[in-house]
Each structure stands twice: as C-alpha cells, then as structure tokens.
Amino acid sequence: MLVYTIKELCRTCYTCVRECPARAIRIVGGQAEVITERCIACGNCTKVCSQGAKVFVNTVDQVRKVLVKPGKKAAIVAPSFPAEFHDVTDHKKVVGMIRALGFDYVAEVSFGADLVAHRYRNLVSEAGAKNYVSSDCPAIVSFVRFYHPDLTQNLVPVVSPMVAMTRVMRKKYGNDLSVTFIGPCVAKKAETGEVDVAITFLELREMFEASGISPDAVIPSEFDPPLGGRGAIFPVTRGLLQTAGVNDDAITGNIIAAEGRIDFQEAIREFEEGMIGGQHLELLCCEGCIMGPGMSKGGKQYNRRALVSTYAQDKMAELNMEEWRKNLELYDMLDLSVRFRPEDMRRDQPEDEKIQEVLVSMGKLTPKDHLDCGACGYETCVDHAVAIVKGLAEEEMCLPNTIDKLHRSVQDLALSNAKLTTMQNALKQSEKLAHMGQLSAGIAHELNNPLGVVIMYSNILLEECKPDDPVRDDLRLIVDQAARCKKIVGGLLNFARKNQVNYQFVNIRKLTESSIEGVVFPDNIKAVIDDNTTSPDALIDSEQVTQVLTNLFKNAIDAMPDGGTLTVRLEDTPGDVIFNVSDTGTGINEEDKPKIFEPFFTTKGIGKGTGLGLATTYGIVKMHKGQITVETNSDRAKGPTGTTFRIILPRRDK
C-alpha cells in the first residue's frame, strides 16, 4: 500500500475521486478509501487533498537502514532536482548535502535518461516499427497494464531512466553497491527495478532537517561520473523527445505527446481505438515530472520548467562531450530491456437496468435531470451510477440530489415542528381549561343553592307586589339579574361537565339547518349553507354540536353589526366531518386570538357576554376527540375582514 487515507482528516470533498485516473478510490460511509490493487501510485490524490488525508508511504527509515549497512552506498538523483531546490543557487551544494547524509556516491539519473532516449530513438526510427507508448513513467505503465492490457505489447520495452542508471552504477562500482533513488515520483517506490529504496524530494528535505544539514554547512561537490547530458531536460514536457532528438513536429513528425490525468487518458483511448494510427505516444501522468507528488507544494509549473532548462543549458555548456560520448558507448552495451505483463483490472460494465435503477433513485428520471456537474467526482451522472453499482461510490455523493433531499427534510421538519407547536399549545390550552373547569364546577356548585333562594323569593316578591308599587321596578331588576346569574352558572356547569358524549347517527346537513333555524338572524345578515359532503352522516352528539354551532352563529351575528353573510361550508373525508363557519365581520385582533377559548374572556361590552360560549364550544369539540381552529383578519389594509372557525369531528363507525 503506497497511498492510503488518514480517515480522521477525510472531509468527503470527493476531490481525490475526481483526480484519480484509475478510479482507485472507494467511498464508504462518506470517506474515501484507496483500493490498493487498482492504484497506479500516481500520487494525484496526495497533491489535491487540501486536508492532508491522502498520503504516501514514507520510506525515510528504509534509507537510514541502507546507510548503516556495510558496503558502498550511492544516491541517484532525478533530473528534476533544480526545480525542487530552487532555494539553493549552486547544484554542487545540493550534492554536498546528499553526501553529508552518508552516501559514498551521488550521481545523476539524467545519464540513464540519455541511455533510454538513445534506445527509444532507435526503436521509433526503425522501418515498419510498431506504434509505441513510452514506458519511462511507471504510473503510465501501470495504467496501461491494468486498464488497457491489450496495449501492454505497445509499451516501449526499455527500462526507466532510474533503473538504467542503477545498472550503470553497479556496472561501474560493483554489484554489491546499495542504490537509493531520489526524485519527485511516488510510483517509483513501486517500480520493479534494482534500486534498494526510493524516496521523494519531500522526504529528502525531511532527512536534511532531521540531520541539521544546510547548504552553507557542507562542502560543495560535483556529481560522480558518468555525468548526464541532454537527459537533464527529461522531466519537462516532451523531455524524452528532446533528449532523444526525435522529430515531434506536428507536420513531419509521428509522435504525440500528452501529459496530465485527462490528456494522457484521452490519448491512450484514441490510440487503442485506432483513431491516431501511425503515431507513437510520449506520455506523462503529471504535467511533467517537475509537478510530481514528491515535490514541495506550491511550486509553479513554468517557473520549475525554466529552472530545469537553465540548469540544462549551463550543464551542456560545461559538459565534456567527448567523455560523455565515450560513456554513452560504454554503457549502451548494458541490457536495458524489459518485458511488461498485462494485469487486467477492468470491471465488467453493469447492466443498463441496474444503472437506470440507481439513476432513478437519485431523482434522475429523464436525460434533462442529468446535470453532469461533476460534484460527485465523476464526469457524468451515468459514470457515477456505474460506480455505485460497482460498489465504488454512494448516492449521497450526488450534491444536487442531496441538497434536494435536505430541502425536503427541512420542509418536513418545519411542518413537524409546526404540528408539534400546535399540539403543545393545544395541550396547554386543555390543561388550562381542565383547571378552569374544576374551578368553575366548584363555583357553580356553591352558587347554585343561594342563587336558587334569591331567584325563588325575588319572583314571589314580584308576584305579590302591586302594579303601582314603586319597588316593583327594583324587584323586576333583581329577578332579571338573578336569571342572568343562573344562566352564567349554567354555562359554568356546562363548561365544566364531565358527562359522556351521547352519540347519535346524525345528518350534519339537517343538523346545520335546524341550528340556523334556532337562531334569530337580523334582516341585514344572510345565512348560507354550502354543502360539499359526499356522505353527510356521522355519529355525534346532536345536542352538543347544536350548542357549538349556535354559539358560533351568535358570535358571528355580534361581529357583523352592519350586516353581512354567515356561511357554513360542510365537508367530509372518509374519517371526518368538517364544519367551516365563516362571517364577514370585524374579525379578531391578533393579540386576542390566543385567549378566545379561555373562560370569561370576551370582547363584548359589559352585560353583553359571559365569555363562556367559545370555552364551552372548545370543551364539546375536545369531548368528541375533534379539533377546532380559527382564521381571522381584523385589518382591512391586509384584505377582507372576517373570521372562520373550522371544526373537524371524527365520523366514527355506525
């Protein structure tokens, strides 16, 4: 396992999914896991992960073990080092720092690049040669072997510059030489070859810091021979072609160069499909080795390219060309051949039915629903669905669908919260009315006996009083007010009663008509019944419901002193019957709405209301296990005034 995830740091941004050319990232529980057997070790995910959740294996300890072993040790340095050590003006100081770690020899991989380029030029120049795919980038080699195995035979059968330089060093200094590769590439850690260990420039800097080695504290030193030549430009775009001196002119040449995760994949795809026949491919997984994952973060591509080019120019100006040619001829006799074996990692394409099922589950019912936004890390919605079927992705990765679900959840939560608030208010109201009912029952019980005496004797005195007696009017007032008190006490008892509902099979249309007939309506008020029921029969207490309607009718009449219309709209559902009592009156003020069902609360003048009508109505509705709500508007500036009471009563079985 060269690349892995630190789960504690993974933030499910899916950037690594998008950047992985091998689709070697699996999302499980919202976290990205590297599928080791599919990984080509390109290191793209480590470059783009802003949280540092994707990391590659650190091999510094292996280097330290090599350094303490008996025998000679050599470090071979990739030609991209000038782009990494831009802060060190003299390359000899970099060499000196590496020697200070304990290496006996420090050589350039650029000479190995010279050898590989020479072999490459001979292969592509042969008459009738097959079309080749460059093999100097180990990530490209793995990608071809895993995901385009039929093209494995087209890989250039030449080892990479790293392996070539390793063979050169052992030829020159002995086969027991320990070799450490230092470069910008993670894939080198997995490349089959003779090196003992490979580390990145980042790890080299780590070793410098741990050992306290700085440019000013070492003796500058030149690379050990054989020195490289044009191979110094190998790590930049078209570096192999320029090193080999191969013609890559767009008109006369037959080489196509591509770099980066998108371009190299497209080039391979078109090459395999025969769309670019007669052409060779020179491919790099990164935007040149100078942008490899083993380089320090934050470097700019063209600045690094310029640093490498400047170093190569200075090098070629000072290079002993005669000695370089002798070395090239000497080591060109080495066996630099390699055979690559295909290792098919492709997965079968899922059935269209399964893909469609996943798309539907993500709300993608038609092609127009396929946004192809790429937020999930896949280029298209179909690619995402395929990955889900293969077990590589999750539906929640689809950001638009997840946002839609979130909005629906928020709406459902708001609705549930509103219902809960309503139920809490209803519960508070019920508790309040229960306490008021107990108090009212006690008061009514205690008042009934003395009030009965007052009523009886006041009526006796009124009957015995002569018509012209001056106290007769006073006695009549006593009788009237005592009768009013009796009505109030009766209302208290009615509000507080705990008797059961006397269910009867009633036609609510006829019940409403009889209730209207029992109320005297002024001439300027019109009563209308709007029957929208399909089955108007229900089991309810006709006497109590009549009282409910009568109370509402009387309140509506009082709310329309200048006349208007009272409308009773009847509705029903399979389980309920519904009364909507509406008026066109003055409405109810917002501050009064929470108190309208409380006993003794009234907005009518003194002597015109007891404040028990709506409280009694509320109690009757609740005894029926029903609901009562009110909608009102008392502000003409906000529209028509008026009030609607909505009563929902369970229909119950016959």
Image: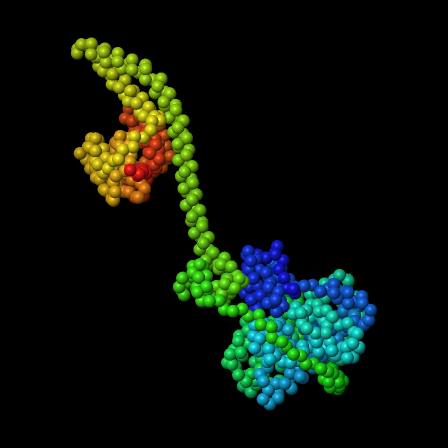
Name the residue at the right extreme. 70
Position of residue 287 in the picture relative to residue 539 (left or right):
right
Q: Quadrant of residue 484?
A: top left
Q: Is residue 136 above or below residue 26?
A: below
Q: Is residue 204 above or below residue 621?
A: below
Q: Is residue 137 above or below residue 521?
A: below
The residue that appears at 42% across and 44% down in the rendered structure is: 416
Q: Quadrant of residue 302?
A: bottom right
**Residue 7: % across, % down:** 61, 56
Q: Quadrant of residue 176?
A: bottom right
Position of residue 360 in the picture relative to residue 223 (left or right):
left
**Residue 58: % across, % down:** 69, 63
The residue that appears at 39% across and 35% down in the rendered structure is: 426
Position of residue 368 in the picture relative to residue 651 (left or right):
right
Looking at the image, which is closer to me, 391 or 189?
391
Note whether residue 255 is visible: no
The residue that appears at 61% across and 69% down in the rendered structure is: 40
The residue that appears at 37% across and 34% down in the rendered structure is: 594
**Residue 630: % across, % down:** 33, 38
